[in-house]
Image: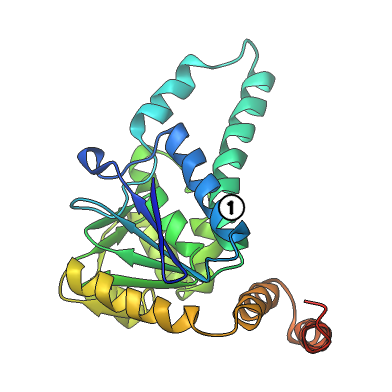
Amino acid sequence: MKTSINNHIATLTFANPDRANSLDEAAWEAMKEAFEAADANDDVHAVILNGEGKHFCAGMDLAVLGSLQSRMAPTPEETKTQLIAFIEGIQATITAIERCRKPVLAAIHGGCIGGGVDIITACNMRYCTEDAYFTVKEIDFGIVADIGTLQRLPHILQPGLVAELAFTGRKMYGPEALASGMVNRTFPNRDALIAGVTEVATAIAAKPTKVVQGIKNNLLYKREHSTEESLKYVARFSADLLLGNK
């Protein structure tokens, strides 16, 4: 994964275009480290996630799934433990996007496939080209999507549409993604996409950083808590912020 920082914006780029930016185990770990570094860097106020080549991200490299077969433990119980640890490790990588205190903007072109969808569901904002497509592809490999899509996508799309995408594995193209709320905006091509997303990120990066981070914190808190709990939480959060405790 390539990383650059300009004008308080970190741009993280999937850089394996020959394999449609599919991710092997090292690439998953590199993505986690990149988001943790962006979180820790006070010079970074916003993050853009994009991909080189024809596609945004094809998700899990199929070679990784193949290699799991060669690492099976002697007993079913030990194998299950290994598989759970592997899945939870990839889940943690995607959660690092969500836990990054800086707003994350996904700039999607071409295919956003399988694990690519898991990744963008952890981003705060999504933008795409008109010809981009999204597919919850796991069903075609005999796998339940298990690293975030089924948990996060229902907070973005209406549940019936999530179910349809997960059960069929069909492609959702840019216009439908915009109409359904998957993305904030579409652009005619990748150059316009990057320019438009950079404009949004620049506007965010110019705002007070503690307030921006507080907004992200409270949006995530509300997703998992009731309105009453969230109101109490934000009251205390704002009091600490005004007193300089945040």
Badge 1 amino acid:
Glu
**In the image, residue 235 lies at what x, y percent?**
81, 89
Q: Is residue 146 visible?
A: no
Q: Along the line of sight, which residue is nearer the eye, 92 or 7?
A: 7
Q: Quadrant of the C terminus?
A: bottom right
**Residue, x 83% and y 83% (percent of image)?**
240
**Residue, x 41% and y 76% (percent of image)?**
201
**In the image, residue 95 lies at what x, y percent?**
59, 54
Q: How is the image coloured?
A: rainbow
Residue 23 sits in which quadrant? top left
**In the image, residue 118 lies at what x, y percent?**
46, 55
Q: Residue lying furthest top in this view?
A: 74
**In the image, residue 241 lies at what x, y percent?**
77, 84
Q: Along the line of sight, which residue is nearer the eye, 227 or 110?
A: 110
Does residue 38 appear left or right of residue 59 in this picture?
A: right
Does residue 215 appear left or right of residue 193 in this picture?
A: right
| Residue linked to disc 1 | 36
Q: Is residue 196 visible?
A: yes
Does residue 227 appear left or right of residue 76 in this picture?
A: right
Residue 138 sits in which quadrant? top left
**Residue, x 45% and y 56% (percent of image)?**
119
Q: Along the line of sight, which residue is nearer the eye, 166 or 58?
A: 58
